[in-house]
Amino acid sequence: MRALASSPQMELIDVNRSARQSIAHAIATIWPSSSRIPANARLTIQVRPLPLPSGDVAFLGQVVCAELALAVSLPTSRKFRAKGARDPENFKFQEFETCLLDGAIAEMIDDRLEVVLSDGRRLRSVQVIPCKLSPCRDERRQMDALRLHEEVIGLVVKMCNAQDRCYRILDEELPGVRVLDFGALHDLELPPLSDIVDYIHLNHDRPGEPISPQTVANILRDWGLRIPSPRPRGGNLAVSTHG
């Protein structure tokens, strides 16, 4: 997603983020085999809230290895599922709020990955549940709609040369994460809708798939942006008088 980026202090691995739905998968991005994890490696999980235009709150998460200056992103989520590490008889998953992962430590115990929450609880088989950010009925349509929204809003911000103003660091402790400041978006002075549509057609990632002006207008409304008035067709004409 556009909200995630590397920082000079920490390299962020964000590719294939949506496919990484467990802490084990995120760690395997760094070390494909658990036997390669150095004994002194400290793996922590950092989570921060991500306010959405709808008013809901999702969470951005990363598995961080400070020794390697690497962070691996997790899918945006509101909840995760896991099993109790100290309850071998209980094989049922339980659901938890994603915010509970903030500050957790991932460690290998007898070749099995355990996640230790900040309150001391130990969990295993921790799986992030990607949240559905769009009302679309199926996941493919949902992801396509989300990408389109992100692309259109990102291009509008770029068109207005407002990247520094509209993107902010979410938290100094969460390396490389920059998110849209929705308050800053609302104050943007936009050009006419026709100019925005022309700019998007020239710069968006799928030139063979034109985006209609109505779709652009709907996205702007969804994100709380003012819909620009249409440009006058004729302009001001001088009136000549005779006589």
Image (cartoon, rainbow, N blue to C red):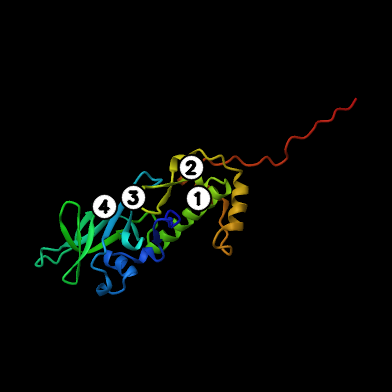
* Residue at image point 58% right, 41% down: 228
Q: Is residue 48 left or right of residue 199?
A: left
Mark 2 in CB contact with mark 4 (< 8 angstroms): no
Ranked by sequence position, the earlier of labels 3 and 4 is 4
Residue that carries the numbered disc 2 in the rendered image? 185
Q: Is residue 233 left or right of residue 59?
A: right
- Which residue in the rendered view is the most extreme toward the top? 243
| Residue 215 in sight | no
Callout 4: helix, strand or loop?
A: loop
Split into 4 quadrants, where in the image is the C terminus? Answer: top right
In this view, 122 is above or below 29 = above
State the image quarter where residue 146 is shown. Answer: bottom left
231, 61: nearer the viewer: 61
| Residue 57 in sight | yes
The dot on residue 52 is none
* Residue at image point 62% right, 53% down: 198
Residue that carries the numbered disc 1 in the rendered image? 153
Query: How far apart in space, not on screen, are marks 3 and 4 (Cα)?
Result: 11 Å
Ranked by sequence position, the earlier of labels 1 and 3 is 1
Query: How far apart in space, not on screen, are marks 3 and 2 (Cα)?
Result: 24 Å
Ranked by sequence position, the earlier of labels 3 and 2 is 3
Residue that carries the numbered disc 4 in the rendered image? 102
Residue that carries the numbered disc 3 in the rendered image? 173
Mark 1 residue crowding within 10 angstroms, few (<14) / some (14–19) / many (20+): many
